[in-house]
Image (cartoon, helix red, strand yellow):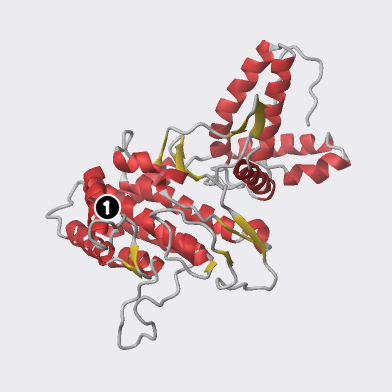
Amino acid sequence: MQKSAAKEWYNLQRLSKEEDHPHLMVALGAYWHGSYFFILQEEAEQSLHDYLKEPGDKFESRELWTQMQGIAEGLSTLHKLYKGTKIAYHQDLKPANILIVNRKFKITDFGLLELKPVILPGDTDMTGVTNDHVTGFYAAPRQGKYTRDCDIWSLGCIMSEVATCDIQGPQGVGNYKKARMADGAPGRDTPRFFRGYQVKGAVLHMHAQLYNHVQSAISTDGNQTMQFQRGFYSKKFFELLNRMFRQYSITADSTHILGEGVAPAAAQVVDELDLLRKEALPTTMLVHEVEQRPQYPESLVSLMEAHLEGFGKTLSKKNREEFPGTTASILKRYIVKLQHKQHEERRQLGLVRLKQFLEGFDQFYELIRTLPSVGKIMGFIWVRNSPAAVWK
């Protein structure tokens, strides 16, 4: 096994064991085929890189930024891994490493991910890891240590291009890259976002251009997308983006020096995006979301609680200890292994049923997340014409 593949498999095993975040692409399993080593993951429709070039099945602004908030949540999870006992630095965040699975954005490619134990509470960003990698146009300016700020810089680059695509389309993203290339060494610069140790002026100019374009729209009456964009792409949004590039404005009451600010934490990015989205939602959208929220009769809740109580009585002591720690990823890996066993034993009928189970698993997972309380999750496996069923 190549060293890079071995490291990524190790990292994915750690992530699968310690976290099960819906916006992190974990491993379902792995296998050898001859001299090749394959890691099994969910099938993606396309990458964000491809989406920015040609959207295909386009996201409306509101849904697009719901997914980008999810990416920020996934990064925050990495930065406070396993209840804050570890820090994980991705080190290669870029649109090509964000995959779209059933219209959900997921961070992938953990080959460069580095884990560091948190030695002291409130571990600062300055206690990073050795900065050994050159990872392309979305990387932050090189510094002595790779810190959480470096991942935030990369996320800022991605958010900047996503905003450009949402407002100006793929052609705007292409023009944005050309502008960044022109804002550097003549004839030999790349579309990276910095020059020296500062964010490029072309980046800040694009942010101002996008803001002015949205806010100067003649009328948004009756157009919910335009209403959302005008509310979302506010000064607060572009101030957040600029801070992610460590860019602070100099004001009379500010102690920050231009280019020397501290980037917001991933959790802060999540909170600010969430607030911006909610403030931007037109009143009609808010009413519609409340109306569409599923309602559950008391009889159904009581029935489910009764089944859960009965289910709990069937569990052994070992089951009770293991059940709370079982994640969706663990269950998926178990099903994949079971598929392999069924295939080896040539039990094709069972294999087909497991395939259907896997295909429906994500929809089931999304369904139970809408329940009033997901503190306790109950799983049913229906076995037809069988005298008994064994839960594992």
Task: Compare residues 201 and 309 and report the one nearer the observer.
Answer: 201
Residue occupied by mark 1: 177
Q: Quadrant of the C terminus?
A: top right
Q: Is 65 left or right of 310, judged from the image as shown?
A: left
Q: Is 3 left or right of 165, judged from the image as shown?
A: right
Q: Is 367 left or right of 116, judged from the image as shown?
A: left
Q: Disc 1 residue type?
A: Lys
Give the crowd class for mark 1: few <14, some 14-19, many >=20 residues within 10 Å.
some
Q: Is 256 left or right of 23, judged from the image as shown?
A: left
Q: In the image, residue 144 lies at what x, y percent?
A: 52, 70
Task: Compare residues 257 and 74 and report the one nearer the observer.
Answer: 257
Q: In the image, residue 272 lies at what x, y percent?
A: 42, 63
Q: Residue furthest right?
A: 317
Task: Compare residues 139 and 371 and report the one nearer the observer.
Answer: 139
Q: Is residue 320 above or below residue 214?
A: above
- Is residue 227 in view? no
